[in-house]
Image (cartoon, rainbow, N blue to C red):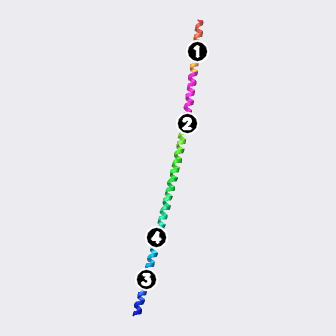
Amino acid sequence: MKVLVIGVLILVAGRAFAYVDDSDWQRQMRAEARETRLEARERAREARGAAREDMVGRRETARARHEAKREEMRARHDFVREIRDSRRDQRRMRRDIFREVRRELRQSWSRFD
């Protein structure tokens, strides 16, 4: 009977050590799983940051392109306005010259009358 009790105690002690060892293994697996989760979160955070920076870069590029087009259109508009004003001034000067010439001709012909 003593042998049986000692055998059972040895088996129980072995199970207890196995449980403690198994507990350490579970703790180690949990620690590894936690570390893997943290690494995955960090990679996801970095990916979101990279995507955000990429989006900001695209937005800035689109904004710059839009601003360049606006500036180009403004320059075209200014150029067309300058040409229109120049032509109007030329017509006005031509009209004034013709009026002046006609007036001088009238005055010169009126002297002879």
Above or below, 105 against 24 in this view is: above
Residue located beneath label 2 in the image: 75
What stretch of residues is rendered in magenta? Answer: 75-93
Residue under the image location 57 percent in, 27 percent down:
87
Mark 1 in CB contact with mark 3 (< 8 angstroms)? no
Main secondary structure type of the part rendered in magenta: helix
Residue under the image location 45 percent in, 74 percent down:
26
Picture disc at residue 102: 1
Indicate which label's residue lies in the foreground, 1 or 2.
2
Between residues 50 and 14, which one lies in front from this camera angle?
Answer: 14
Residue type at tag 3: Arg
Picture disc at residue 15: 3
**Image spot of residue 80 (x, y percent):** 56, 32
Mark 1: few/some/many CA within 10 Å (<14, 14-19, 20+) = few
Between residues 14 and 58, which one lies in front from this camera angle?
Answer: 14
Residue type at tag 4: Ala
